[in-house]
Amino acid sequence: MLDIPTRVKEVQGIDPQNIPAELLSTNEPLVLKGVARDWPLTQAGLRSHEEADAYLRAFYDGKTVGTFLGAPENNGHYFYNQEMTALNYASERVRLDQVLDKLLEHKDDEQPPTFYVGSTTVDVCLPGFRAQNDVTIPMDKDPLVSIWIGNKSRISCHFDAPDNLACSVVGKRRFTIFPPEQVDNLYPGPLDFNPAGQQISLVDFANPDFEKFPRFRDAIAAAQVAELEPGDALYLPSMWWHHIEGLSPFNILVNYWWRTSPDFVGPAVNVLRHAILGIRDLPEREKAAWKALFDFYIFGDSDRPRENIPPAAQGLLAPLDDMKSRQLRAWLINRLNR
């Protein structure tokens, strides 16, 4: 375990149906203690693994779920093989009740194989579950609600684009969290070959190699840790890096994901890939010039580029709406296909 003295700020006494919007709009992580403590699933898990298992099965409708299967010697770490030519686990679609059977079968093993049901939409897999187990996210758009189920695990450090409320419902979890500007010190791996579509840190947090990853010490200095008991929830702002440990033989996490930007705003990761295509390998002096343009048009005050241009002539410099975004997409598709 890394020696990280800074703990994520905690708040108590939050009503799960009346979470103040300002708590979920900051740019700092925050633990909401006990916000899901009264969920029937949380209470079942506090009594026993078997009761939580039975409660979950009552909602299951037979659909298959995406599942990661890891060998015992991986110790729950979902990562690459040593040569980075493949992932160190298998991915299958299986019935959820079969995964639950395996979790029960191996719950007392000292070094069990690992089973991990990742990011499964609750309303699809467990219809009716949220009628009894839910929080209200105070945003204009409904969140995407996902469930994660497994035994002891270590999910490599990564980031997610949406804001996120992660409710630790059964078992205990540890999140190690880093602000977005620590990306250089976290040594991210490949963009196009990774466990779940998102680049991950190549540092093994259980045994960091500081000779190979010396800047990771600087990341540790900027890190925060959240230790979640059953019923606790962690608010993770967009783009914050996080390493997740499932610490119990049976762990269930329920995530609420949302974006505050309009629906017509495209995924920012597409811009990153397009910049790799068009900017990254330019001469340094040209890259510096493009950086100045991006700072002016994208990262600076959005009013500045149009301040002396009449509204009728602003074109792309005017605020985007659905129609303008459609036109821009069509223009980009046409140019990229040439």
Image (cartoon, rainbow, N blue to C red):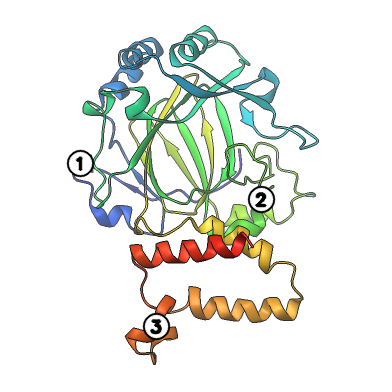
Question: Residue 280's spot in the image, x, y percent?
Answer: 70, 67
Q: Is residue 309 above or below residue 119?
A: below
Quadrant of res 165: top left
Residue at figure coordinates x 56%, y 47% from the top left: 4
Question: What is the secondary structure assignment of the residue under circle 1?
Answer: loop
**Image side of residue 297 versus residue 11, left or right:** right
Residue 82 picture quarter: top right
Q: Amino acid at mark 1?
A: Asp
Q: Is residue 27 above or below residue 200?
A: below
Q: CA distance from mark 1 to mark 3?
A: 46 Å
What whole-number distance in Å separates the C-alpha atoms at marks 2 and 1?
37 Å
Q: In this view of the protein, which residue sits in the foreground, 288 or 238?
A: 288
Residue name at image x 71 percent, y 35 percent: 80
What residue does disc 3 label?
Answer: 314
Number of numbered discs overlaid on the protein picture: 3
Q: Residues within 10 Å of mark 3 (few under 14, many from 20)?
A: some
Sequence-wise, which precedes: disc 2 or disc 1?
A: 1
**Label 2 packing within 10 angstroms: few (<14), some (14-19), many (20+):** some
Q: Is residue 175 above or below residue 98?
A: below
Q: Position of residue 230 (x, y in %)?
A: 36, 29
Q: Which numbered mark, 1 or 3, is in the foreground of this view?
A: 3
Q: Which residue is mark 1?
A: 15
Q: Mark 2: which secondary structure?
A: loop
Q: Is residue 109 above or below residue 229?
A: above
Question: Which is more toward the observer, 300 or 326?
Answer: 326
Residue 188's tag is 2
Residue type for callout 3:
Gln
User: 172 and 23: which one is in front?
Assistant: 23
